[in-house]
Image: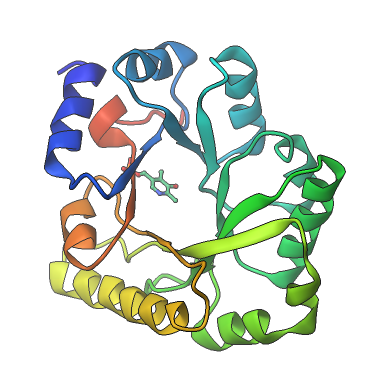
């Protein structure tokens, strides 16, 4: 199927109030333009340099989401244009994003990444780290960032019960925080293999790559 057909199929499978991030990492601008021409305006990338090259070449009404792990020394390359950073996992990183956002006279929206998977290799904070960040004076002094919610990645497994447990945990954490942080509106969870389950568990934003653009070749 074409990228356009894939996109339409995914869009018809997700409710209107769930935001679709088209994950275009490793794919050429040509492929992204096919999605753009089919109406897609939100793209997700996991490498700052690659995202910046694509941003430079593509129409300027696109929202660029950084969904990968962010190195602090690279924040400056995306600070002028990035719409949402999904993978914020420390106060240190948040402070650097704030610094670069201020330089650009912007407020940058961020999600805090929570570690919900079994794999140690996946990034993210645990509940205690999250609470202490949100309660810290340093966080409250940051004027150029806005935390809009949480992001998580489930374990890479076929065990749907396991995945459901992880998504449900993240959703309950999100609901708990929302009472004290009314700005929290985004719960980013779900990819090609598990997005229907993520939506069932309360996701408001899904990040879908291979089901739109086809398999990635990392060679
Ligand atoms: C690559 C990636 C995705 C998309 O994965 P697919 O399985 O291709 O849909 C989603 N989220 C993150 C953080 C990713 O790195």
* Residue shown at 42% from the left, 27% from the top: 41
Report if residue 74 is visible in the image. no
From the viewer's perspective, is residue 17 above or below residue 104? below
Q: Residue 185 at what x, y percent from top left?
A: 43, 62
From the viewer's perspective, is residue 45 above or below residue 143? above
- Give 200 or 72, whichever is nearer the viewer: 200
- 206 vs 132, left or right, is left
- Give 41 or 217, whichever is nearer the viewer: 41
Which color mode does the image show?
Answer: rainbow
* Residue shown at 22% from the left, 52% from the top: 195
Quarter of the image for the N terminus: give it.
top left
Determine the residue located farthest toward the right in the rendered image: 103
Q: Residue 145 at what x, y percent from top left?
A: 69, 58
* Residue shown at 25% from the left, 45% from the top: 192
| The image quarter in which residue 36 lies | top left
Q: How many marks?
A: 0
From the viewer's perspective, is residue 13 above or below residue 91? above
Q: Residue 32 at what x, y percent from top left?
A: 41, 19
Q: Residue 115 at what x, y percent from top left?
A: 46, 72
- 53 vs 18, left or right, is right
Of the four image quadrants, the one with ligand 1 is top left
Report if residue 90 is visible in the image. yes
- 53 vs 76, left or right, is left
* Residue shown at 55% from the left, 75% from the top: 125
């Amino acid at each position: 199927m074409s990228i356009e057909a894939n996109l339409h199929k995914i869009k018809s499978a997700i409710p209107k109030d769930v935001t679709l991030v088209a994950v275009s990492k490793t794919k050429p601008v040509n492929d992204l333009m096919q999605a753009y021409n089919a109406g897609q305006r939100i793209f997700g990338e996991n490498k700052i340099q690659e995202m910046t090259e694509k941003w430079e070449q593509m129409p300027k009404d696109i929202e660029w989401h950084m969904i990968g792990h962010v190195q602090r020394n690279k924040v400056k390359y995306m600070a002028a244009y990035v719409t949402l950073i999904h993978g914020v996992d420390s106060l240190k990183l948040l402070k650097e994003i704030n610094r670069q956002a201020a330089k650009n006279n912007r407020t940058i929206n961020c999600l805090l990444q929570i570690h919900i998977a079994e794999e140690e290799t996946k990034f993210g904070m645990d509940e205690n780290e999250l609470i202490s960040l949100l309660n810290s004076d340093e966080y409250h002094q940051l004027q150029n960032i806005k935390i809009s919610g949480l992001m998580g990645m489930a374990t890479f497994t076929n065990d749907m019960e396991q995945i459901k447990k992880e998504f449900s945990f993240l959703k309950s954490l999100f609901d708990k925080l929302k009472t004290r942080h009314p700005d929290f509106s985004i719960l980013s969870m779900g990819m090609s293999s598990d997005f229907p389950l993520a939506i069932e568990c309360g996701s408001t934003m899904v990040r879908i790559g291979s089901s739109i653009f086809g398999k990635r070749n990392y060679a």
